[in-house]
Amino acid sequence: MSAAARSTLRSLALVLGLAVAASAVAGLGYGRVAAEHTLVVLAPLGVVTILLASWLGRRRALLGGLRRQFTVAAVVAVGAWLAGTALFALRMFVSDHDAFFTALLAVYAGVLGWWAGALLASGVLDDVRRVRDGLRAVGEGDRDVAFATSARDEIADLAASAQAMEERLAAEERTRRELVAAVSHDLRTPVTNLRLLAEAVEDGVIPEERRREYLSQLGVHVRRLGALIDDLFELSRLEAGDIRWTAERVDVEGLVAEAVEAMRPQADAGAIAVRAELPADLGAAHADPEQLQRVLYNLLQNAVRHTPADGSVVVRAARTPGAVEIEVADTGPGIPAGERERVFEPFTRGDASRSSDGAGLGLAIARAIVEAHGGRIWLAEAAAGTRVRFSVPAA
Ligand SMILES: Nc1ncnc2c1ncn2[C@@H]1O[C@H](COP(=O)(O)OP(=O)(O)O)[C@@H](O)[C@H]1O
Ligand SMILES: [Mg+2]
């Protein structure tokens, strides 16, 4: 049985119960005969009205706009009232005088009911129109639409949802614009350098040893560009959810040891001590090992890059219920309070890192990977230095 049919049956049972209750009250006041008359009038009237209303409810499309639908509801109510009055008059030998004035009152009250309904409906219609016009404007690109309605009802809920949608759209568009601006800016500098170098080499007027130097600079810029494009590609794939996962048991201890060893030459060059301090009972994570390695590597690279000579970088990990938390801590200058909120956004670079190699994508990629695993990444409180911590599900 369909949901609509079930709801009609429920209404029918309810209206019959109501008719029985009303006839019981009539019986208490005026005896058994009055009770019978009441039941015979009210029960069929209730059934017919409910069936008619359910039928109309399923065919709202036939009724047209909301105003018409409200009018039909009022007409059904008045019709039920009039029919009821007429049936009572016929069955219970009400005097013509009483019947006339009862019918008159019924018609008058019915008209008032219809009127009140129409007035109420016009407020509803205004709100519906306001939401509709607002949505149209948003659809045409307007992002300053205020969705305000006059009541606290379902239409207000609709307006609030529309408002939230508009704000999310505006934020997404802002992010996209900023991203495009940042990408073009980051591409322009190396490309300009490349063009100048290429022109100088082409000119052929420079001495041989300068030529060699220029060519090696060309190589540096090309590699940097390539790395930027790889990172951008990776980030866009991660954000689109377009990645093939091979989540498996990952031995965190081994993974951390590998990443630390991979960083050692760079750390040694900067006289920075890098080490792992892991508990014996750490257990395994459930993750894609390559991706997890990439997160660790990005964090370690940042830490080593920002730590001055004689400083240290330490990887720590802990088992929490259902997850493994890994932290990379360094003794560098730390991340200023004003930047802490934004460091995980693409192209965010601290003032001190403006001129460095990075494009500001490392932490954004790390966050995308961690979140794709169902974990999270954040900056832990640190008295000195930086502590970036993330969680991944335990195996
Ligand atoms: N360990 C750290 N110590 C200090 N600042 C950091 C550290 N890690 C990240 N940051 C800041 O966060 C910014 C964003 O980092 P990231 O996304 O890896 O980009 P990139 O390394 O390319 O600059 C960095 O430019 C830097 O300002
Ligand atoms: Mg980085």
Image: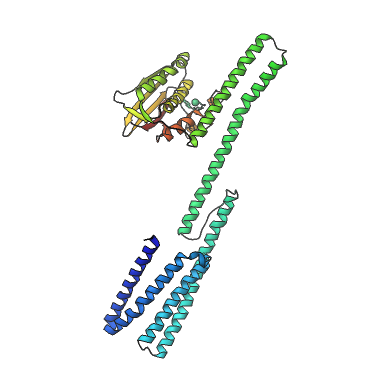
Residue 346 spot, x, y in % from top left: 52, 32
Q: How many marks?
A: 0
Q: Is residue 96 above or below residue 210?
A: below
Q: Quadrant of residue 283?
A: top left
Q: Residue at x 67, y 9 (%)?
A: 208
Front position in the image: 270 or 229: 229
Q: Quadrant of residue 291?
A: top left
Q: Is residue 19 above or below residue 242?
A: below
Color style of the picture: rainbow
User: What quarter of the picture does the C terminus occupy?
Assistant: top left
Residue projecting furthest to the front: 1
Apparent side of residue 215 relative to residue 86 in the rendered image (left or right): right
Q: Residue at x 48, y 21 (%)?
A: 305
User: What quarter of the picture does the N terminus occupy?
Assistant: bottom left
Residue 130 spot, x, y in % from top left: 55, 58
The reply to whether residue 250 is in sight is: yes
Q: Residue at x 51, y 52 (%)?
A: 162
Front position in the image: 279 or 32: 32
Q: Quadrant of residue 180?
A: top right
The reply to whether residue 333 is in sight is: no
Residue 320 spot, x, y in % from top left: 32, 32
